[in-house]
Amino acid sequence: MIRDYYAPLIAESRIAAIADKWREEGRIQSCLTFNIVDFFVHTLMRRFDPRKGIVHLRLADDLYEKNPAFVSYNPPKLSIHKEIWSDAALGDPNAREIVAHEIGHLILHDQHVFSFQKASDPKLKFRQHELESIEVQAITFADNFLVPLKFVFACRSAADLSRQCEVPLEMALRRLRHLKNRSSFFEYCGESCPECANFTLVRSGTCLKCDTCGSTTGCS
């Protein structure tokens, strides 16, 4: 998580879809919190892309505080400090974010990203979009994996979102800012749609109308 590299652009919607797919693979699509260590061992390691190879895990006590986890490739491997791994299993928000970030690297990237120049290289080509950064891509994956947008609608404060999803407050704030910038989030009433189950009901006169499927409810 210290060095940054360039990679082919992946649209944010595509990263979100990939994160949702892996939540479904782990059968965690209907709950906010889950044991990310169990997911890594019992889902990711067993269902990982066979073209990339078998995922390896190295628990170590010799990693630096500023870089407690990193991913290497060929074969794909997560190296992570033992305490971070243990904390993640216990639901520590910061540790969960670290593991989710590295999972993003494993799923989205391979050894070919290292053919790009480092971000610190003064000769680096001009970056057209921030999502050409593997670090931004991994952050985007972790955000969508731990805090899917469909769950954010149920929370009205960053503190509530942080607590319910067991993520750092900074991540919760980032998710709320993201919604505020892209939708009429603060107009939603916080109830789920009886038709599609999304938390996108907005008041329309005496009715509630769903921004997602268009159905109405509660009319009198």
Image (cartoon, grey):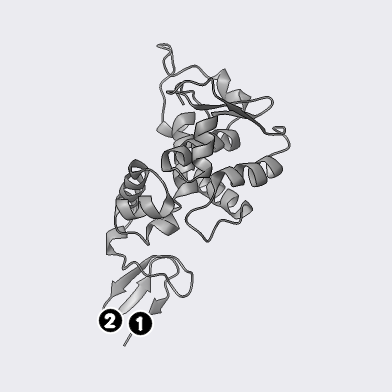
Q: Position of residue 190 (x, y in %)?
A: 34, 66
**Label 1 is placed on what type of residue?**
Gly
Residue depicted at 37% across the width and 52% down the height: 163
Q: Which mark is residue 218?
A: 1
**Outermost residue to the bottom:** 220
Residue 189's place in the image compared with 90, above or below, is below
State the residue at coordinates (46%, 30%).
135
**Could you say whether the residue bearing mark 1 is in a helix, strand or loop?**
loop
72 relative position to 163: left or right = right
The residue that disc 2 covers is: 206
Check disc 2 and give the amino acid type. Thr
Q: Is residue 27 visible?
A: yes
User: What percent of the width, then of the height, locates residue 27?
Assistant: 61, 56
Quick check: 82 above or below 119? below
Near mark 2 (Cα within 10 A), the count class, few <14, some 14-19 or many ≥20, is few
At a point 50% along the width and 41% down the height, the residue shown is 88
Measure the alpha-carbon separation of dots 1 and 2: 7 Å
Q: Position of residue 101 (x, y in %)?
A: 49, 36
